Amino acid sequence: MFVDIEFPYREEESDVFEYVKRPRISLEIFSARKNRWITLDEVLADTGADFCVLPRFIGNLLVEDITKGRYIEIKGVVPGVRLIAYIHNFKIRINDKEFEAPVALADSDDVPMIFGRVKSLDLFDANFLRGEKLRLKD
């Protein structure tokens, strides 16, 4: 299916600047545990993230045991800081476009929901329009 959808940036508080606008999207992910689609709002579209990441409490809605996925340690901007996560493959849907993608389920609730590049954001022609909106097309 053809996707052409726009998401407005959200103005959010920042530790460095007073406010920052961030590209947030809505998507659906299929929960094998609940046997239904779960809607996730306010997911950060992040071209700097290799893959999608979700916090543990959402992972627990999707699968019985997050640790049954492939163990990884995610390294970010801060050297030496690592986040333990488990890679699972999920069906994801944005509007009418459905695809499978690897998603890291973090072993922490203190992480944001991130829509990364590999087999996700890279499937789209993503246009970040002057810090005002994000347009996804395929």
Image: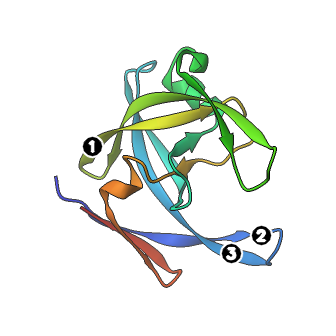
Kind of element beneath mark 2: loop
Indicate the quadrant where residue 122 lies.
bottom left
* Image position of 129 with respect to 80: above or below: below
In-front residue for pair 96/120: 120
**Can you identify the residue that label 3 sits on?**
20
Q: Where does residue 18 sit, x and y in percent of width and height?
A: 80, 78
Indicate the quadrant where residue 125 lies.
bottom left
Classify residue 130 as left or right of residue 54.
Answer: left
Give the residue type at disc 1. Glu
Classify residue 3 as left or right of residue 9.
Answer: left
Q: Where does residue 96 sit, x and y in percent of width and height?
A: 24, 50
Which circle's residue, 2 or 3, is located before the other in the chain? Answer: 2
Give the residue type at disc 2. Ser
Residue 98's disc number: 1
Kind of element beneath mark 1: strand
**Can you identify the residue that label 2 sits on?**
14
Q: Where does residue 58 sit, x and y in percent of width and height?
A: 58, 33
Distance of label 1 from label 3 (alpha carbons): 30 Å
In-front residue for pair 33/77: 77
Disc 3 packing (10 Å; few <14; some 14–19; many ≥20): some
Kind of element beneath mark 3: strand
Residue drawn where x is 47% and y is 58% of the image: 25
